[in-house]
Amino acid sequence: MTNMISREQATVLVVDDTTDNLVLMNELLNNDYRVKVAGSGEKALKIVRSDAPPDLVLLDIMMPGMDGYEVCRQIKQDPATTHIPVIFLTARVDLSDEKLGLELGAADYITKPISPPIVLARVKNHLDVKAAADFLRNKSDYLEKEVEQRTREIVAIQNVTILAMASLAETRDNETGNHIRRTQYYVKALAEKLQDHPRFSHFLTPDNITMLFRSAPLHDIGKVGIPDRILLKPGRLSPQEFEIMKTHAPLGMRAIEKAEKALGVGLGFLSFAKEIAMSHHEKWNGSGYPEGLAGDAIPVSARLMALADVYDALISRRVYKDGMPHEKAAAIIMEGRGSHFDPDIVDAFLEIQASFQSIAQQYADTDDDLAEKEEQLKVF
């Protein structure tokens, strides 16, 4: 953080088209300050806009070419120089002139012939005011950067925690870690496509889309509570086993609720994570689980994940099956329009199929991924 400037460090720029006046002001000020001089408004602006700008400008009004009013106007209009105080030095004593100068942003107005003690006192006062303002501005900038840094750290910790929890669930499932990434990006792509849709625009704000992206990996966190004999069963589940499997949805929501209570604060992305974990197996026609929700009663976050999850299950290779071609998977998604899935979300999917294919290709499971998963499952 920059410290307040001392009098010895302060630089004063004197602007006047009369050499005698420049000499006079230099002799008056150079014992206490570094002094720069300019004989025209154009030269003054070059100094003000340089890498070593002055801390204060003493500015004559009546100059040929660019007058002092225009110099002041340009100094105050530039965000990089607007904080530099300007004191007008002029022989003009008309109140309207003084009013104009102050309206342009001048800090003070001193009439000629000058009184050296008055000039020194006012220069000192305005430099002290500027030093205090600089200190506060620098402190504000410093604190803003600190807040940004802390925010980035918190977000990073949250993201690592989410991925760690999701990866833990994934180790006990037939899914690979790439499934988490793919569904994250599918959800984001759908949300961005729908953010201007009349039914979704109020919800799919940029902040909410970011939170959806961050919370999506936790959609199957509840599977950590499902017995291995059911979770890892290669064949079709019995009706009784399927009832147990369905409990992974409320288990996931309750696990996130407990994490939220442990934190002692509600977080937006965890609210979405609870919705997704609990409801991404609900169906538009009410035939899904665990609550049999239908239509708009299903949270938007869960409706997006429902399509993303099913699509990925269809096209992805597993240790026990080959992946389905995109065209066939897209046809199945289309068949579920209005029954399994929100019709408008299906329409958005059909319009951005190429994005889904690109995401699937970018995060495709390799032979090594599948071999690693097979070895991982042997442990259980």
Image: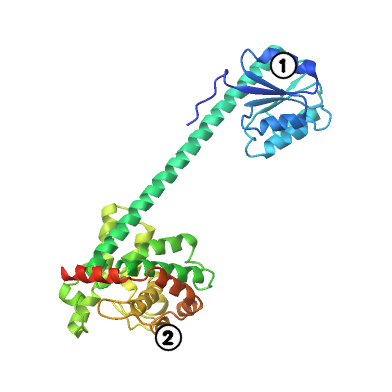
In this rendering, the label closer to the viewer, 1 or 2: 2
Q: In this view, does 335 lie above or below 70?
A: below
Residue shown at 44% from the left, 75% from the top: 357
Q: In this view, does 38 lie above or below 295?
A: above
Say what secondary structure mark 2 lies in.
helix
Q: In this view, does 138 lie above or below 25?
A: below
Rendered image: mark on residue 25 = 1
Q: What residue type is labelled 2?
A: Ala
Rendered image: mark on residue 331 = 2
**Which quadrant of the figure has residue 34?**
top right
Q: How crowded is mark 1: few (under 14 residues within 10 Å), some or many (20 or more)?
A: many
Foreground residue among 102 and 124: 124
The x, y position of residue 260, in whole percent, is: 29, 57
**Which quadrant of the figure has residue 61?**
top right
Q: Which amino acid does label 1 sit on?
A: Met
The x, y position of residue 202, in whole percent, is: 50, 67
The x, y position of residue 100, in whole percent, is: 77, 33
**Does residue 112 appear to the left or right of 149 in the view shown?**
right
Say what secondary structure mark 1 lies in.
helix
For residue 166, say whether it is visible: yes
